[in-house]
Image (cartoon, helix red, strand yellow):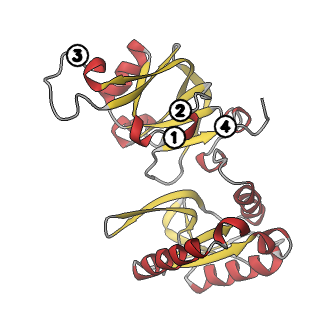
């Protein structure tokens, strides 16, 4: 099995009754229509759960995981035979059956409350991560930029969901600033040079800009070979919009210092 192959699936757990099913009966359901690729190709080895605020003490964290035993497609009426028949009863779901839940030695935290559907990741990342942004494994280019952000102490949220006029977008990196938030995108050369993708990216940019986001896009060349120039643009944009929001104090913001050896400076 390839080292970077996704075999761990983190799913949303936003219902206490669903978590009770997971604890007592060892299964979880995902609509076939919205299932991630590692469920469809049956490559999930472990399933884990991201708890929402309804779980209070465990909110915005990943604590429990289990080894997957079997994945089958069933009707909703088979999952819940005691419920009255309705327009969802014939819908198809992946029923993911697994062993007993196991607690991680230390929770994986989301430092900022966020929406989340699925994270597909590797065992290597899952079992060492302490913060949710370290889990994502969708793009080697994004991994490289994330490592640069960590090195430069730039606080960002990876794969951040946002909605505009009933349209949903996943931002590669969201940087929250005092005056205006920033969406930073990694444009893989082959995919984003397609004429259709160029038109779609422009439309997406327009919607995000109209909703108050500033959009920065960087190519493979920008990230791999001209990072200092790209970093200067990111740095200047962050400072232009009042600095990065401090996760330890949401009323404070951090400017990025031009001297990379200096620590971030808090300002009120």
Query: x%, y% of residue 249?
Result: 51, 62
Q: Which mark is residue 6?
A: 4
Q: Which mark is residue 39?
A: 2
Between the C-alphas of marks 3 and 1, the distance is 26 Å
In the image shown, does 267 or 6 lie closer to the viewer?
Answer: 6
Q: Residue furthest front?
A: 195
In the image shown, does 210 or 50 lie closer to the viewer?
Answer: 210
**67 relative to 20 in the view: left or right:** right
| Sooner in the amino-acid sequence: mark 4 or mark 2 | 4
Query: Are discs 2 and 1 less than 8 Å apart at CB?
Result: yes
> In the structure shown, which secondary structural element does the residue marked by tag 4 occupy?
loop
Between the C-alphas of marks 3 and 4, the distance is 33 Å
Label 1 crowd bin: few (<14), some (14–19), many (20+), radius 10 Å: some
**238 relative to 168 in the view: left or right:** right
Q: Which residue is mark 3?
A: 81
**90 relative to 261 in the view: left or right:** left
Q: How many marks?
A: 4
Query: x%, y% of residue 61?
Result: 50, 39
| Sooner in the amino-acid sequence: mark 3 or mark 4 | 4
| Sooner in the amino-acid sequence: mark 4 or mark 1 | 4
Between the C-alphas of marks 4 and 2, the distance is 11 Å
Looking at the figure, which quarter contains the N terminus? top right
Q: Residue at x 45, y 52 (%)?
A: 113
Query: Are discs 4 and 1 less than 8 Å apart at CB?
Result: no
> In the structure shown, which secondary structural element does the residue marked by tag 1 occupy?
loop
Label 2 crowd bin: few (<14), some (14–19), many (20+), radius 10 Å: many
Query: x%, y% of residue 98?
Result: 51, 17
Label 3 crowd bin: few (<14), some (14–19), many (20+), radius 10 Å: few
């Amino acid at each position: 099995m390839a080292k970077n192959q996704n075999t761990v699936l983190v799913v949303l757990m936003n219902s206490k009754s669903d978590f009770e099913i997971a604890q007592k009966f060892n299964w979880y359901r995902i609509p076939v229509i919205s299932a991630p690729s590692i469920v469809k190709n049956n490559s999930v080895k472990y399933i884990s759960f991201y708890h929402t605020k309804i779980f209070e003490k465990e909110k915005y964290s990943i604590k429990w995981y289990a080894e997957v035993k079997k994945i089958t497609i069933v009707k909703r009426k088979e999952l819940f035979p005691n419920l009255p028949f309705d327009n969802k009863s014939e819908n198809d779901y992946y029923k993911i059956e697994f062993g007993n839940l196991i607690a991680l030695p230390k929770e994986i935290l989301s430092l900022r409350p966020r929406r989340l559907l699925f994270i597909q990741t590797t065992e290597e990342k899952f079992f060492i991560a302490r913060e949710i942004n370290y889990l994502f494994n969708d793009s080697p280019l994004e991994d490289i930029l994330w490592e640069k952000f960590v090195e430069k102490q730039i606080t960002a949220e990876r794969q951040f969901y946002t909605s505009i006029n009933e349209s949903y977008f996943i931002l590669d990196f969201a940087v929250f600033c005092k005056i205006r938030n920033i969406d930073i995108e990694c444009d893989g050369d082959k995919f984003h040079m397609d004429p259709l993708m160029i038109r779609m990216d422009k439309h997406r940019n327009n919607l995000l800009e109209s909703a108050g986001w500033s959009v920065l896009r960087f190519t493979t060349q920008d990230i791999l070979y001209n990072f200092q120039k790209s970093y200067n643009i990111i740095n200047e944009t962050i400072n232009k919009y009042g600095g990065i929001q401090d996760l330890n104090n949401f009323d404070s913001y951090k400017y990025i210092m031009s001297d990379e050896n200096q620590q971030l400076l808090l300002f009120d």
